[in-house]
Amino acid sequence: MKKRVKRKRFILLLILIVLAALFIQSDWLGKRIYPISYQEEIKRNAAVYELDPLLIAAIIRVESNYKLTAVSRKGAIGIMQIMPDTAEWILKQDDFGSITVKDAGREAHAGIALGSWYMKELNRQFNGDLVISLAAYNAGPGKVKQWLNKGVWNGEEQTLKDIPYGETRHYVQRVLYYYKKYQSIYEKL
C-alpha cells in the first residue's frame, strides 16, 4: 500500500515538474507549435524589402504552410502563393537576377523574394496600411481599391466582416493571428 502511495506521489510530482517546465519554457513550446522554416531566406528578404520577418513568416504560414511547391485551386504557386501573371509582372519591375516564374513555384529563395517584393509594393500603394495591404495580397489591389472607393469596406481591422470575399476576410484574420502569435513567441527572427 505504501508503495502505491509513493508511486502516485512520484507521478504527481513528475506531472507538476513537466507542467512547470512547459510554462517556464513556453517559448520553447511555442516554437514547437509555431515553427518558422526558411528563416535565413525570410530574414534576408525582410531586410532587403524593409518588412518585418515575422510578417513574411505569417504570410507564408497562411499561404502554403511552408510547402515550396504548393499550388492553389486558382493557380497561385510556391511558398508565398503568387499568381503566375503577378510573378511575371513583379519580375519586370525589379532585378531579381536569374529568378523565373517557375522558380517561384519550387524554390524558397525565389518565392520569398517575389512575395516579399510584392508585399512591399502593396504597402507602398496603400500607404503602409498592413490590413489593407494584406487584403490586397489576397484579393488583388484593384479589387481592394474598388471596395474602399465604393465604401464597401473602410479598410480597418475592426470591420473585416465587411470584406465581400469570405476568403479574403479569413485570409487577413489568419495572417494577423499568426503575425501576433509569432510576435509573442519570437523576440526577433
Image (cartoon, rainbow, N blue to C red):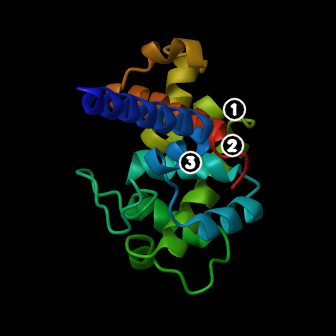
Query: Which of the two discs, 1 and 3, labels the residue nearer the N terminus?
Result: 3
User: What residue do we see at 36% from left, 34% from top?
Assistant: 11
The label nearer to you, 1 versus 3, is 3
At label 2, counting other C-alpha atoms closer than 10 Å, the crowd grade (few under 14, some 14-19, many 20 or more) is: many
Q: Which amino acid type is marked by label 3?
A: Trp
| Disc number for residue 129 | 1
Task: Verify CB contact (< 8 Å) between mark 3 and mark 2.
Answer: no
Viewport quadrant of the C terminus = bottom right
Residue 140, image x and y in percent?
47, 42
Label 1 close to label 3 by CB (< 8 Å): no
At a point 29% along the width and 27% down the height, the residue shown is 2
Would you say residue 135 is visible in this rendering?
A: no
Label 3 vs label 2: CA separation? 32 Å
Q: Are marks 1 and 2 in contact (CB under 8 Å)?
A: yes
Q: Hey, what amino acid is under mark 1?
A: Asp
Q: Is residue 34 above or below residue 176?
A: below
* SS category of the residue bearing label 2: helix
Read off the residue under disc 3. 28
Residue 123 location in percent, x, y? 68, 43
Residue in view at x 39 percent, y 77 percent: 102
Instruction: Please give the name of the residue rendered at 70% of the width and 49% of the height, measured from the top-left corner.
Output: 52
65 relative position to 93: left or right? left
Q: Amino acid at mark 2?
A: Asn
Which mark is on residue 7? none
| Quadrant of residue 20 within the rendered picture | top right
Looking at the picture, how far across and down is residue 128, in whole percent?
A: 73, 37
Residue under circle 2? 123
Q: Nearer the viewer, residue 70 or 166?
A: 70
Quadrant in the picture for the N terminus = top left
